[in-house]
Image (tube, rainbow, N blue to C red):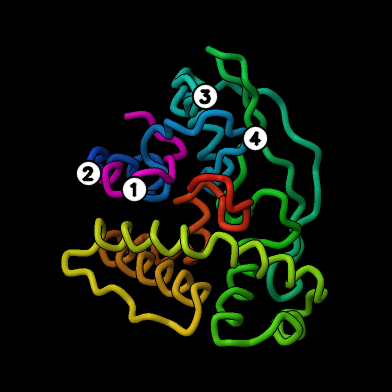
Amino acid sequence: MPHGPICGECTRDRLEQHDPLAFGQAGDTPSVLGAGVRRGCEGCRVLIVDSDVLLVERQLRDRLLTCPSCGAVLAPWGHSQPREIRGDLGARFLLRPRRTRCSGCGVTHVLLAEVFWPRRADAAVVIGAGLEIAALVMGHRQVAAYLGRAEGTVRGWLRAFAGRAEAVRRHFTVALVALADDPVVPDAAPSTLADAVSAVAAAHRAASARWPGMLTVSRWEFAGRAIDGRVLTSPSAAI
């Protein structure tokens, strides 16, 4: 089986079709986070991949990453411009994503590690922490003060996530049911945003119970990988 990003569409069907342990030899990453070929996402240009740079390079060399549009093999095509990403506890990352070109349709794709989300200057774990704080019915000013981020930045996160919250909740509730032997759907929360946060956490717990190695992946890296980084994208973009 090729190993690459998996589409966020029809999670339950995808999980039933792909062997969750097939990715183990390459990086012990189950299918819900990307083992399998991502199809049905016409026009997408950013692919979320494993955070292990050497693993991704090995996948490219072994022709295991495929184009989401036509299914042909992706080939190395240089790198994107470097930029700095802010992590937690004051950490800074210099990000220079790998670029690839489809050997079939010729479309280029940027490979973005699961610890980051497209078009965001903060790591997924930082943004996710902000969403979790906001789910406790705290405003953007409180979240910004806690994380040490600009109020405008945090307000942008919360507005973007609020627009996708219902779609995120549905997607990860389906993932929870697909992953857990005896799924317990979270109780209704005070807001749709909080419902979505709870669904992501529940699906991550279910994935960790099935694949213990998932405990090394934060729930928000899990979320970004599962829906190809579309956690904070426009509500019009399908998950």
Residue identifier under label 3: 61
Quick one: quadrant of the N terminus? top left
Give the Cα distance between marks 4 and 2: 28 Å
Give the Cα distance between marks 2 and 1: 9 Å
Frontmost of labels 4 and 1 is 1
User: Label 2 neighbourhood size at 10 Å, few (<14), some (14-19), many (20+)?
Assistant: few
Q: Which mark is residue 110?
A: 4
Quick one: label 2 or label 3, which is nearer the N terminus?
Answer: 2
Helix, strand or loop at mark 4: strand
Residue identifier under label 1: 11
Secondary structure, magenta segment, majority class? loop
Give the Cα distance between marks 1 and 3: 28 Å
Residue identifier under label 2: 16
Amino acid beneath label 4: Val
Amino acid beneath label 2: Glu
Helix, strand or loop at mark 2: helix
Q: How many marks?
A: 4
Give the Cα distance between marks 4 and 1: 23 Å
Residue found farthest to the top: 104
Amino acid beneath label 3: Arg
Helix, strand or loop at mark 3: helix
Task: Please tell me which residue lies in front, 214 or 17.
Answer: 17
Write down the region rendered in magenta: 1-16
Give the Cα distance between marks 3 and 4: 16 Å
Quick one: label 1 or label 3, which is nearer the N terminus?
Answer: 1
